[in-house]
Amino acid sequence: MSGPTILKGHATDLLQTWDKPLDLIVTDPPYAFGGSGDEHAISATVAVVLRETAKKLTKGSWMVVLCASSFRSVSYMIESVRGIVDPVRFGSWVKPVSRTKVSTPGWAWATVIAIAMRKGPKNRPDIGPLPLLDWVSAPVETTGRRAQLPVDVSDWAVRPFSVGGGVFLDPFAGSGALPLAATRCGMESYGFEINPLAR
């Protein structure tokens, strides 16, 4: 089994020539919601890319988006794809310790929310329920990157929705952890990554 194909470039540009119907999208986009200048541009890019990739999903297929553990982040991701895919389930990646630099009252932010959204009202007939929990616990992996998904988290996010032989895309691939998980599930997997030095 060959590994995933990582296409280098800006996701909005790469999507313009993308012609493969998608059977699964799982992504962990940059978390920047609000602000001005660069942060505003990142937020807008995330919304546009999520919406355009969701349009390429086959009916009955799934899109899983990881986001910050705030209502603002969850709402932003859902609103980006409203009318194309519908939110169905929420899961959580629970980190043993919080790594955020944001100081707020209340709980430490040691979770990442996973939103599972589906295109169309029916489950794909070739996807059955797996005996998996709606949460996974794993420490953050650091290998010189600011954020890299652990293997356990990548597998947890991809495997329940994978389609053997189907086409997978992560439009914000980073280190390539999610496309690798899709490859392990027997999917034809792709990722977009703007950083030419990644992976």
Image (cartoon, helix red, strand yellow):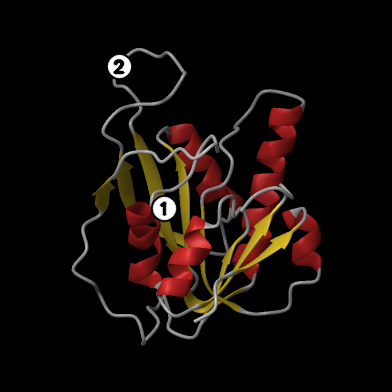
Q: Residue 42: horizontal and vertical position, in percent?
A: 69, 38
The answer to whether residue 30 shows anywhere in this view is yes
Q: Residues within 10 Å of mark 1 (few under 14, many from 20)?
A: many
The answer to whether residue 89 shows anywhere in this view is no
Q: Is residue 183 above or below residue 179?
A: below
Q: Residue 194: horizontal and vertical position, in percent?
A: 72, 50
Q: Amino acid at mark 1?
A: Ile
Judging from the image, what secondary structure is the residue with disc 1 in? strand
Looking at the rendered structure, which numbered label has been put on residue 106? 2
Looking at the rendered structure, which numbered label has been put on residue 18? none
Judging from the image, what secondary structure is the residue with disc 2 in? loop
How much space separates mark 1 and mark 2, taking CA atoms? 23 Å
Q: Is residue 69 left or right of residue 75?
A: left
Residue behind mark 1: 115
Quarter holding residue 186:
bottom left
Which residue is outermost to the left? 131
Quarter holding residue 7:
bottom right
Report the residue at 25% width, 54% height from top.
134
Report the residue at 66% width, 38% height from top.
43
Q: Amino acid at mark 2?
A: Gly
Q: Is residue 148 above or below residue 49?
A: above
Q: Residue 21: horizontal and vertical position, in percent?
A: 63, 79
Q: Is residue 116 left or right of residue 177?
A: left
